[in-house]
């Protein structure tokens, strides 16, 4: 983590907003999917990308809420190009349906922002019987990315523009279970820890981006894959913890980022020319940062990839 006033090699700091880090960038003609786009960082990412000419598809669980957010953004940016599509990341059937519908639209895909997530709920299983945080934060995005990857490859080839995949992770990746990823205990309710399980899912986000980056480089494909920490932000991720949520809202304004600052690193990694060709990195405060040694473990990344493939195979 950086000090709030410190500026890294990029020239941006923790207090830079999404608008500031993308100032002057023309992204007209690009198409992006943003998951979890109906609130928080996802909404701000959608707004900022749209303001730079990107056609944004808001991939949201609640379409009605998504449409209201779209209307709000269009009131501010009348020429914004935004569409809303339904996506429930805790359901593989929903992920498959979304990807199938998207690919059938014959739209290109330059940017995939894997942003949505749940944080520290009590032990629950997804619709596919997998621990909810791992299923939603990691597996849903893993499957979505794989199903959209051919589209991204074709877009990059046809447009001769670099595609970018952005996984929104967290500094919470530093606090997973002791073994990092619990391959044999992913659904073990008796030893479930809300914070450790969240850390595990966020570690998986980084490992996914790193292994994907390795594979894309090996193929010689013009697509990058990176992960990032958006910053400590008061969003509705804490909805499962009423007291903590109340305290964060009360005192958070003194030490937490606001949402425009929280969306900055996402927008920086998605759009900024400084990031062209950079892949397999972890970012914080719009600068390259250092994740844990577990997050850089190439063998662990391969193991997570194989494990995820097995869990997302159609029955």
Image: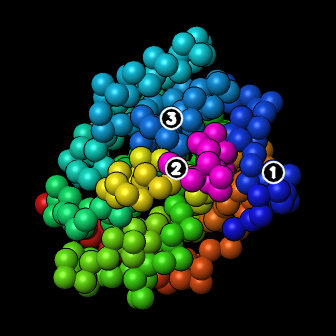
Q: Where residue 259 sits in the image (x, y, percent)?
A: 59, 42
Determine crowd level at label 3: few under 14, some 14-19, many 20+ residues with C-alpha closer than 10 A: many
Discs 2/1, front: 2
Q: Where residue 315 sits in the image (x, y, percent)?
A: 13, 60
Q: Where residue 115 sits in the image (x, y, percent)?
A: 48, 49
Q: Compared to 250, does 24 lie above or below? A: above
Q: Earlier in the sequence, mark 3 or mark 1?
A: 1
- Describe the element under mark 2 as helix, strand or loop: helix
Which residue is labeled 3 in the image?
A: 43
Q: Mark 2 and mark 3 in contact? Answer it, CB < 8 Å.
A: no
Q: Compared to 13, does 294 lie above or below? A: below
Q: Earlier in the sequence, mark 2 or mark 1?
A: 1
Residue displayed at 24% across by 44% down: 94
Q: Compared to 175, does 128 lie above or below? A: above
Q: In 3D space, how far apart are the residues under numbered discs 2 and 3 (Cα atoms)?
A: 22 Å
Q: Is residue 53 magenta?
A: no
Determine crowd level at label 2: few under 14, some 14-19, many 20+ residues with C-alpha closer than 10 A: few
Q: In 3D space, how far apart are the residues under numbered discs 3 and 1 (Cα atoms)?
A: 21 Å
Which residue is labeled 1 in the image?
A: 12
- For residue 162, what is the image quadrant? top right
Q: In 3D space, how far apart are the residues under numbered discs 2 and 1 (Cα atoms)?
A: 28 Å
Stretch of the chain drawn in magenta? 249-266
Q: Where residue 245 sits in the image (x, y, percent)?
A: 42, 53
User: In terms of secondary structure, what is the magenta stretch mainly?
Assistant: helix
Which mark identifies residue 250?
Answer: 2
Can you say which quadrant of the picture contains the N terminus?
A: bottom right
- Describe the element under mark 3 as helix, strand or loop: helix
């Amino acid at each position: 983590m950086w000090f709030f006033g410190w500026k890294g090699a990029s020239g941006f700091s923790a207090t830079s907003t999404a608008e500031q880090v993308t100032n002057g960038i023309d992204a007209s003609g690009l198409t992006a999917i943003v998951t979890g786009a109906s609130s928080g960082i996802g909404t701000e990412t959608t707004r900022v990308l749209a303001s730079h000419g990107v056609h944004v598809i808001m991939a949201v669980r609640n379409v009605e809420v998504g449409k209201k957010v779209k209307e709000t953004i269009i009131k501010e940016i009348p020429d914004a190009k935004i569409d809303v599509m339904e996506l429930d990341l805790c359901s593989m059937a929903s992920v498959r349906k979304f990807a199938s519908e998207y690919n059938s639209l014959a739209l290109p895909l330059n940017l995939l922002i894997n942003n949505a997530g749940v944080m520290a709920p009590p032990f629950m299983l997804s619709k596919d019987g997998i621990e909810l945080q791992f299923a939603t934060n990691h597996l849903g995005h893993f499957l979505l990315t794989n199903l959209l990857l051919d589209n991204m490859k074709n877009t990059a080839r046809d447009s001769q523009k670099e595609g970018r995949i952005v996984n929104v992770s967290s500094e919470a990746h530093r606090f997973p279970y002791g073994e990092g990823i619990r391959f044999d205990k992913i659904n073990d309710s008796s030893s479930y820890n809300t914070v450790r399980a969240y850390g595990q899912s966020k570690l998986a986000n980084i490992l996914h981006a790193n292994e994907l980056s390795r594979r894309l480089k090996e193929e010689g494909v013009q697509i990058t894959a990176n992960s990032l920490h958006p910053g400590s932000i008061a969003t509705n991720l804490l909805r499962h913890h009423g007291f903590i949520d109340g305290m964060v809202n009360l005192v958070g304004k003194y030490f937490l980022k606001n949402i425009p600052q929280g969306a900055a690193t996402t927008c920086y990694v998605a759009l900024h020319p400084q990031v062209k060709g950079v892949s397999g990195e972890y970012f914080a405060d719009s600068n390259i940062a250092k994740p844990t040694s577990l997050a850089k473990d190439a063998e662990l990344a391969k193991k997570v990839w194989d494990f995820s493939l097995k869990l997302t195979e159609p029955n």
